[in-house]
Image (cartoon, rainbow, N blue to C red):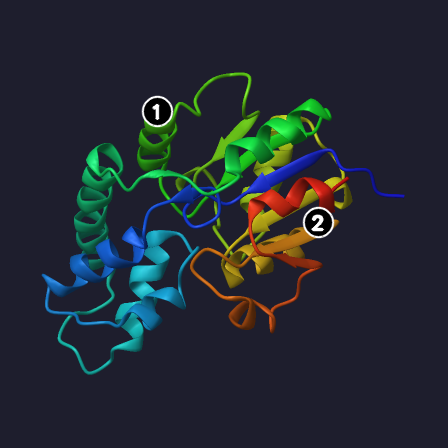
Amino acid sequence: MKKLELVVFDMAGTTIRDDDAVNRCLREALAVNGVEVTREQVNAVMGLPKPVAIASLLSARQAIAVSADHATVRRLHGEFLHRMIEFYEYDPAVGPMPGARECFETLRRRGTKLALDTGFSREIVDIILRRLGWDAPDLLEATVASDEVSRGRPHPDLIFEAMRRTGVANPANVAKVGDTPSDLQEGIAAGCGWVIGVTNGTHTREQLLPHAHTHLIRCLSELPALLR
């Protein structure tokens, strides 16, 4: 019988409200280098480690003159990082998603461990945590960035690292919560007992339905009752 020990939350679009800034900043970083992509194309790679997402977008645009070699991906990722850092440090739109903090506090009172995992690098993760005051030691047991594991989503490495850092051995006792297909794929790959999609982020219920999951919820306010 599974027993909930740990909930691993995604960041942007799941616990962090950013008014679609990740998508916008990624499109802008590509556009200044002559690569035009749509919101829908970027949304299709949302949740992946950002260098992987950039390489995927470049590879899909075979007619363009910009190659997907390592140096180009690194340069474009640098452009993206610059925009994201400025946004998360100064933009007034940044804040918790509705019900996020209350959800954290309810689960913590029950003795559940909480972690964040993300397609962001550690540099951006730390900026967000400081901005929201989520770097307090009594709120989150662990945060895991995509540049701290060998493979990002949809592989299970981020979840396994969160389990290692929190001392949880059995993935059946872990819930993964996110707003993208790659979040759900990550949770399934890890063997999580709960794989929960949130539909008020980057993807709608209809967009998440085709991907394997255990539950879909409208917002984080519904999560504590689901996990009771």
Q: In the rendered view, would you say 83 is above or below 96? A: below
Q: Quadrant of the N terminus?
A: top right
Give residue 192's mark: 2
Question: Where does residue 174 sit, x and y in percent of width and height?
Answer: 70, 41
Question: Where does residue 149 sit, x and y in percent of width and height?
Answer: 48, 41
How far is mark 1 from mark 2, CA to CA? 29 Å
Q: Residues within 10 Å of mark 1 (few under 14, many from 20)?
A: few
Q: Residues within 10 Å of mark 2 (few under 14, many from 20)?
A: many
What kind of residue is marked 2? Cys
Indicate which disc, 1 or 2, sits on the residue closer to the N terminus. Answer: 1
Q: To which quarter of the image does residue 163 belong?
A: top right
Q: Residue at x 29, y 61 (%)?
A: 54
Can see residue 70?
no
Question: Where does residue 72 sit, x and y in percent of width and height?
Answer: 18, 59
Q: Residue at x 25, y 66 (%)?
A: 68
Give residue 130's mark: 1
Of the residues tagged 1 and 2, which is closer to the observer?
Answer: 1
Q: Residue at x 59, y 48 (%)?
A: 177
Left or right of residue 50, residue 30 in this image: left
Q: Quadrant of the C terminus?
A: top right
Q: In the rendered view, would you say 20 is above or below 212? A: above
Give residue 96's mark: none
Question: Where does residue 17 sit, x and y in percent of width and height?
Answer: 38, 45
Name the residue at the right extreme: 1
What kind of residue is marked 1? Arg
Q: Residue at x 49, y 32 (%)?
A: 143
* Label 1 SS: helix
